[in-house]
């Protein structure tokens, strides 16, 4: 809010007259005088939380395209994280932006760093990860482990070699790759799930675990994928200057 010199002078005069702990009005704006004699603008609470909540990127696209009442205003789409997108309106006179749409991706809870038994790890890899070459290798190793395999495994600190069944009555030593490239479901389903490195470890009891090993680089890739999706599906609105996508 910009004030003229006359308004500032009038505000100063009224604040001296009113004293501390009072509310004064200048040019239809309300100001409070605190215990130190400082004056602050009282902003109206008219930015109610009316944002539409969705779980998909297509929901964001559909809502933005249907906001005819906002056609004369700029809309800003911020990719805040791999699982969160927010659509903001234009600045009001107090420098605030109204949230119009909030998108939160529905992703499974994956237990990184927890040792799971053979069946639990098998289910997790198949239901919570996209198919990759390394995922298929891990499934083969886990599915064919012998009971004593991990107990007798050789370990060089990086990769483990375990005994697995290779036929009806035969066994063999196989080396488990490390790190492994896996693509968990951890962003919106409409975009490609980033593949990143994980450390795969096994221990006695036929239990195994995966540990993230990419330093969080996957998040930048996921956010870039989300931005690319929104840009592609809102190209007309972006080219006209109506929509700005930020990641």
Image: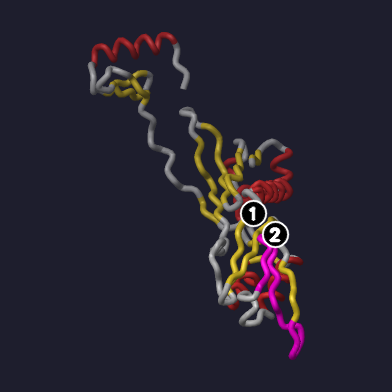
Identified at 59% across, 66% down, the residue is 209
Q: Nearer the viewer, residue 177 or 171?
A: 171
Asked if the magenta segment contains residue 241, the reply would be: no
Q: Tell me which residue sits at (57%, 74%) in the image.
A: 204
- The residue carrying mark 1 is 213
Is 4 above or below relative to 181?
Answer: above
Instruction: Tell whether position 163 is magenta.
Output: yes
| Residue at image coords 48%, 28% | 93
The answer to whether the residues at label 2 and label 1 have Cβ atoms under 8 Å apart is yes
Task: State the extent of the magenta-drawn residues as a range.
Answer: 153-171
Alpha carbon distance from label 2 to label 1:
8 Å
Say which label, 2 or 1, has the lower sequence index. 2
- Tag count in the figure? 2
Q: Is residue 76 above or below residue 131?
A: above
Give the image quarter of residue 189: bottom right
Instruction: Give how far across and how far down residue 126 sits, in percent.
Output: 65, 72
SS state under label 2 = loop
Q: On the rendered image, what quadrant is the C terminus found in?
A: top right
């Amino acid at each position: 809010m910009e004030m003229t010199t006359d308004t500032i002078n009038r505000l100063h005069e009224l604040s001296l007259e009113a004293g501390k702990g009072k509310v004064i009005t200048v040019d239809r704006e309300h100001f409070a005088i605190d215990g130190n004699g400082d004056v602050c603008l009282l902003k109206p609470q008219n930015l109610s939380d009316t944002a539409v909540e969705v779980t998909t990127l297509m929901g964001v696209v559909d809502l933005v395209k249907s906001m005819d009442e906002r056609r004369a205003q700029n809309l800003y789409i911020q990719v805040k994280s791999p699982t969160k997108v927010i659509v903001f309106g234009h600045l009001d006179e107090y420098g605030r932006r109204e949230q119009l749409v909030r998108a939160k991706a529905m992703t499974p809870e994956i237990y990184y760093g927890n040792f799971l038994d053979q069946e639990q790890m098998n289910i997790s890899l198949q239901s919570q990860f996209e198919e990759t070459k390394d995922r298929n290798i891990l499934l083969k190793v886990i599915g064919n482990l012998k009971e004593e395999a991990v107990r007798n495994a050789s370990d060089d600190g990086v990769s483990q070699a375990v005994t697995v069944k290779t036929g009806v009555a035969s066994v063999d030593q196989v080396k488990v790759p490390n790190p492994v490239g896996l693509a968990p479901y951890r962003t919106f389903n409409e975009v490609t799930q980033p593949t990143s490195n994980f450390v795969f470890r096994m221990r006695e009891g036929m239990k195994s675990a995966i540990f993230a090993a990419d330093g969080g680089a996957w998040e930048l890739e996921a956010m870039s994928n989300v931005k690319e999706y929104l840009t592609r599906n809102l190209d007309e609105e972006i080219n006209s200057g109506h929509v700005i996508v930020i990641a």
